[in-house]
Amino acid sequence: MASQENDNRTSAPKPARTRKTSTAAPRRRRQGRPPLGDAGPDATRNALLDAATKLFARLGYEPVTTGAIAAEAGVTQSIVHYHFGSKQKIWEAAIDRLMAERIAFYENLVEKPGGMDPLTRLKLLTKGLVYANAHNPDFARVTVHEGSVPGDRMHWLVESYMKTAFDKFEGAIRDAMAAGAIREMPLRDVTLIIVFGASLIFTFSGMIERMYGTPLTDPEAATSYADSFIDIVFNGLKPDGAPGAAPLPFRLPGQPAQG
């Protein structure tokens, strides 16, 4: 017994466990720029603009949040604020990019009007507007939301883009009237009939597809509508209306220019 007690007293105590510490330097949190994932900054910015354009055109400005834009683009909300700062800024950037693409498409579509008679030039501008809206009706959809409510965004749209487009058509209409190619009528009325008749119809493409089986944005449907619209505007619906004699010098992208 004594020997056992001596063994218990003289046995060395077990050392306490200690937590292992890493000698590696601690990871520092990245400041400022949020992670972009596999996409680079340009791809991420374009994805955000795609998402913003889609949502603003479909829903209008107020219901859309930066979180919804981020979710549509598949990124985090912080990336929206990093690239654009606010919902207002991404709305403006989306419209700017949409209009730049629209103008490039339009200019590639319509023959240069130099040397044309005023009536042919006006018809070409009208047909080009129809095709631009058929190609991408999102700008027309945005104007439906913003054009009915006075405010800063509507004023921005008018000053940035709408005035320029309307001035172009008003000038062409005025020239055609001065040349005696079309009747003298209130310039505003003729401009509104042409511009909105060639634009707003495409905001109802889904409804038209439901009724007729084909969306108006379909190339064949858009061509048919453009030709009928021009014929009705410039010749009327009377059976004795003069049909368009010469084909318009007009080409689709990829087609050779007419001589």
Image (tube, rainbow, N blue to C red):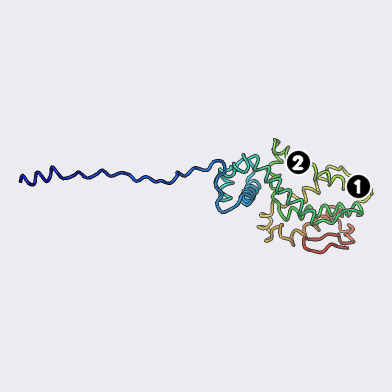
Helix, strand or loop at mark 2: helix
Q: Residue furthest left?
A: 1
Q: Give the image location of residue 58, x and y in percent.
A: 64, 48
The residue that appears at 5% across and 44% down in the rendered structure is 2
**Which mark identifies residue 175?**
1
**Which mark identifies residue 218?**
none
Q: Nearer the viewer, mark 2 or mark 1?
A: 2
Report how many numbered discs are placed on residues in the image.
Answer: 2
Q: Residue furthest top?
A: 151
Q: Give the image location of residue 257, x and y in percent.
A: 84, 62
The residue that appears at 92% across and 53% down in the rendered structure is 117
Q: Nearer the viewer, residue 3 or 50?
A: 3
Q: CA distance from mark 2 to mark 1?
A: 24 Å
Helix, strand or loop at mark 1: helix
The residue that appears at 73% across and 41% down in the rendered structure is 157
Q: Residue furthest right?
A: 179
Q: Give the image location of residue 38, x and y in percent.
A: 56, 54
Q: Nearer the viewer, residue 166 or 254?
A: 254
| Crowd tier of the residue under label 1, counting other residues whose Cα lies within 10 Å: few below 14, some 14–19, many 20 or above | some
Q: Give the image location of residue 189, x and y in percent.
A: 83, 43
Left or right position of 174 against 11: right
**Residue receiving disc 2:** 160
Left or right position of 116 against 66: right
Q: Quadrant of residue 171?
A: top right
The residue that appears at 78% across and 52% down in the rendered structure is 129
Image quadrant in which the C terminus is located: bottom right
* Residue type at numbered disc 2: Ser
Q: Nearer the viewer, residue 33 or 108?
A: 33
* Residue type at numbered disc 1: Asp
Q: Give the answer, above or below, for where 224 lies relative to 159.
A: below
